[in-house]
Amino acid sequence: MEMIDKSVFIQDSILRDMSEGVLVIGLDGSIQYFNQAAVDILEKTEEELSNQKFGSFFLMTIEMMCLLKLY
């Protein structure tokens, strides 16, 4: 295994096995990478997270804000 391949493998293993949620967001705001902890924390499926815009998970409707007394 080449040195670069080994380094990438180690980085992927560390990120994948972390208990903290990890999201990598691209310049366009889309989710480029996530680990299983992020899936569990956000209570989303892998399909729901793949290539979605990060902000789409945190947008609130006016109705929701009124219920939470934020509007």
Image (cartoon, grey):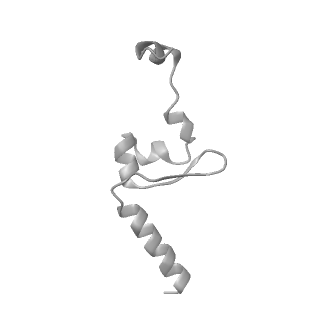
Q: Residue at x 44, y 53 (%)?
A: 22
| 46 w.r.t. 10: above or below | above
Question: Residue at horizontal 49%, vertical 35%?
Answer: 57
| Marker count (numbered) | 0
Left or right: where 41 falls relative to 5: left
| Percent position of residue 33, x then y | 51, 55
Residue sticking out furthest to the right = 28
Residue 24 in picture, x, y percent from top left? 53, 53
Residue drawn at point x = 39 percent, y = 47 percent: 39
At 44% across and 74% down in the image, what residue appears? Answer: 10
* Residue with the most extreme front position: 70
Height in image: 53 above or below 64? below
Q: Kindly indicate the quadrant of the structure image that contains residue 18.
A: bottom left
Residue 38: image location, x then y, percent: 40, 49
Q: Is residue 25 left or right of residue 70?
A: right
